[in-house]
Image: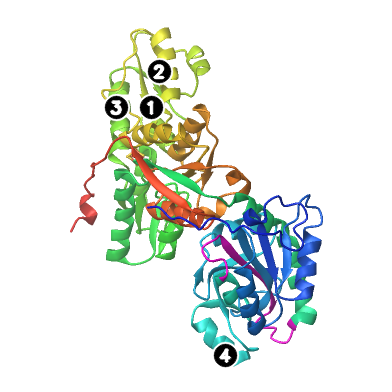
Amino acid sequence: MTETIPRPHGGVAGAGAVAAADPGNSLLLCAPMGIEARALRRGLRDSPNPPSVLRTGYGTTRAVRQAERLSHRPFGQLMIMGVGGGLTTDLRVGDLVVGTEVGAVTCPSAPLLAGELRRAGLAARTGRITTVDHLTRRPQRAALAADGALLVDMESAPLAAAADGRPVAVIRAVSDTPHHPLAGIVSGGLAALRSLRAAAPVAERWAAACGTRRVLLAGPRSFCAGVERAIEIVERVLQRQGAPVYVRKQIVHNTRVVGDLTRRGAVFVDELDQVPDGATVVFSAHGVSPAVRAEASRRGLAVIDATCPLVSKVHAEARRFAADGYTVALIGHAGHEEVEGTLGEAPGSTVLVQTAADVAALRPRDPERIAYLMQTTLSVDEAADVAGALRERFPSVRAPGSDDICYATTNRQAAVRAVAAESDLVLVAGSANSSNSVRLVETCERAGTPAHLIDGASDIQLDWLAGTSTIGLTAGASAPPAVVTEIISALSGLGGLSVSERTTTTESIRFGLPKEVRQ
Ligand code: SF4
């Protein structure tokens, strides 16, 4: 996939472009009314090189005329900022609406801007902005809202069209709402103008992040077989039994997945005492200890086990080694649900080791009978270091029959390493509590490439992007593929974007479903 934006226009510097060396590569800020333009200039007071702020005139007729003039004016990026009428009842005066579609123009970078505005402490939403050629009254506003618009104004659509393929964004501050239709520019407008002023520096950061770049996708990325299976189990139970369906812990460590299933009727609980007697409970992909299974049985709960088969394999190894009289050194991270579950299989015989220093402190019952196991989502390199320390101190140490770090973790780390080598920055889609996603960030950092963990496009900080020409992109095993699509779309709004993939291996593993949810 390759998009190309037209080269910035050449020509003379626009009014107000104080020190911009090349107006053809610079931000042009359009504000319909004088008070809006003044609010923006005040907001940019501390900027060493403020962008041009152009007062374009009130109303659709002036906007159309100004759009025609803009076709002869050099600029690199176009942003339209002003006040507007909120159309939905959940909007408040002073809230900011970042346009995803403005008339016929799409603004893909809207989620990036909205996220940056929220981090600046402003209330910001993304949505459709519609432009009309007259003042609107309540019935028409209700009709516009019913049609899916979030905000109405009288200028944005023709002005946005003047971007003509260059990066464009629209930010409107709500000056009146269905609850306060008469607030208008005089009273409600003051709050809106304050928000506009505070948003102006964000417009500058957006422009600095704009540019032509390429995205390198790591392959494989995103969902693994264990995560797909766990999600499908909850979906099937919801289908069969209806809501609510209780799930102990997050089914997989991803806020999008959990949010989506919650909306569909799943209830995520920390412990079984939050599940009503006799109800059905799903155990998460990370596994549980035998003590949790026993408690579920004592309570008469119907259990459906979504533990990943590769986690179950580690549990079985722990039981086997312990039964054979071995001390089991479990290489993993304290507090992770998977580790707690595995430790619970043989608590008297298993010791958690996180580092080589932990290995040095080990006091096994019999140094000749020691074995090690690993959490499935560890960093391959770090785990190898700890396993090496174990082998050095206990030459007869027993290793697991096959690798405990699962295929999905290993493959995603190898793939992101390949991408990091070519990238200025790597974005890792995944949630903060996702072990395998965090390991992907660490893998990049160890390779010398900065990397950031993001739940979605709105988490991308604009200053990460400034000056980058190649961005690596991957997703942890629990992050949905749709998040990757969303991130690419948002980046495409910052300028021409080419997307290619570096595939280090392909995956075809699938796991069967438990009998309770099979057809
Ligand atoms: S990351 Fe590995 S262990 Fe975890 S659910 Fe996926 S396949 Fe299973």
**Mark 3: secondary structure:** helix
Circle 3 or circle 2, nearest the eye = 2
Residue 375 in sight in this render: yes
| Residue 433 coordinates in the image, percent (x, y) | 50, 43
Give left or right: position of 385 versus 239: right
Discs 3, 2 touching: Cβ within 8 Å: no
Q: Marks 3 and 2, how far apart in space?
A: 16 Å
Residue 301 is at least partly visible in this image: no
The number of numbered badges drawn on the structure is 4
Q: Tell me the mark number nearer the camera, choosing from 4 and 3.
A: 4
Task: Report the residue marked by disc 4.
Answer: 140
Amino acid type of the residue that numbered disc 1 sits on in the rendered structure:
Met
Nearer to me, 5 or 408: 5
Residue 345 drawn at (x, y percent): 36, 31
Label 1 vs label 4: CA separation?
62 Å
Ligand 1 - quadrant of the structure image: top left
Residue picked out by circle 3: 317
Instruction: Return the residue at label 2.
Output: 387
Q: Which residue is mark 1?
A: 374
Q: Give the distance between the C-alpha atoms of the residues marked 1 and 3, in whole angstroms.
A: 10 Å
Front label number (1 vs 4): 4
What's the residue type where badge 3 is placed?
Glu
- Contact? badges 2 and 1 (CB < 8 Å): yes
